[in-house]
Amino acid sequence: MRNIDLKYLGPNVNDKDLIELQESHDKIHKVGFNGVKKIFTPLDKKVEYIFYDNHILAYVKSSLGYPAYYKVPPLRIKDPVKAILMDLDGTSVKSEDFWIWIIQESTASLLNDPDFELEEEDLPHVSGHSVSEHLEYCIRKYCPDKTVEEARKYYFQHTRREMQAILDGNGKQDAFEPAEGLKDFLLKLKSREIKIGLVTSGLHEKAWPEILSAFRQMDLGDPRDFYDAIITAGFPIRNGEPGTLGELSPKPHPWLYAEVARVGLGLAEKDKPHVIGLEDSGAGINSLRLAGFTPIGMSGGNIEESGARSLCYDYCDNFDDVMELLNN
């Protein structure tokens, strides 16, 4: 670490995916002061990595005003693989376009403009993070006079309508499709007695219809009986109803992956080198990395654009590639 070894972040780390900073976003840490050697952030600037002589801190930003610091654990991988943690949107189920459409519809409602459409440059900012962060971005850019609270009301109106329509069998066509090769991959993991945890930053009311829809198409029965553990971002806070923690602690924070592994799968600290995670988003890769699990990037998401490929232990185009990695 004394020579600022970037390989501590991952074996494939490279300078082109990282931006060097002179101080952290909150201005607490500055290069050359109090032991700080270097500060780097991936291209999407969602997490800042602060290098000291013998450790690294990660500063996770929050557009909602609740950032956090984490000590970055070393990246370790050992045989045999005991568990695989899998992201939902993009990795297991192809649904990103649908949820981006819901964000677009919510913004259109805020603007009272049914013809509103997001721009190409908006896409990295409206996927991979929490609902509130997606909406906060759209508000800042398109309607700064509105609030996240107003946007969330429209978001859940559109979501409840579309989710119920899908469950009734007459919703948006091709909204949720299992990723190519998912069924065979899951069955192979089961045959090898590898535990499987499903992890999503999506709220339960939007995530559960996705999971059910995919399992119906794969004819795999009840997903609650198939997966060893499932965790979502819980239930939204609404007037007169209790909510659960989820909007302020999603990916890239480590808590969803940490909880599904430790509480859901019963994996201890010593088991971490035997756990890998599959993600197609930069936020998810950072989340796995901060939770201490080996991150495997899946193509098709925003890993390349976010600069998170440097943090990946490996990068795969499909589930066959992942199986080959497991067999090596």
Image (cartoon, rainbow, N blue to C red):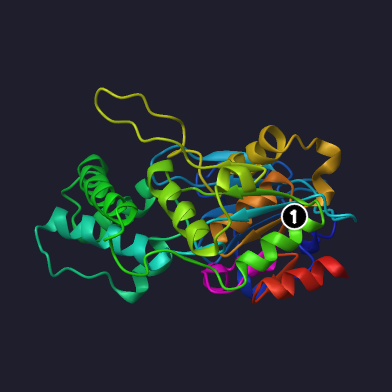
Q: Quadrant of the N terminus?
A: bottom right
Q: Quadrant of the C terminus?
A: bottom right
Image-based side of 187 in relation to 59, left or right: right
Q: Quadrant of residue 79?
A: bottom right
Magenta region includes residue 300: yes
**Observer-nearest residue: 201 or 49?**
201
Magenta region includes residue 172: no
Residue 179 visible at all:
yes
Instruction: Give the percent coordinates (x, y) of residue 55.
Output: 78, 45
Tell me what residue is drawn at x 52 percent, y 45 percent.
27
- At label 1, the amino acid type is Lys
Image-based side of 187 in relation to 78, left or right: left
Residue 13 visible at all:
no
Instruction: Give the percent coordinates (x, y) of residue 226.
Output: 63, 48
Q: Quadrant of residue 166?
A: bottom left
Tell me what residue is drawn at x 81 percent, y 37 percent.
269
Tell me what residue is drawn at x 44 percent, y 47 percent.
208
Instruction: Give the percent coordinates (x, y) of residue 288.
Output: 66, 51
Secondary structure under tag 1 reads helix
Up the image or down, 225 lies above or below 128; here it is above
The magenta span reads 296-311
Image-based side of 123 in relation to 13, left or right: left
Instruction: Give the percent coordinates (x, y) of residue 229.
Output: 63, 41
**Observer-nearest residue: 33 or 104?**
104
**Observer-nearest residue: 112 or 243?**
243
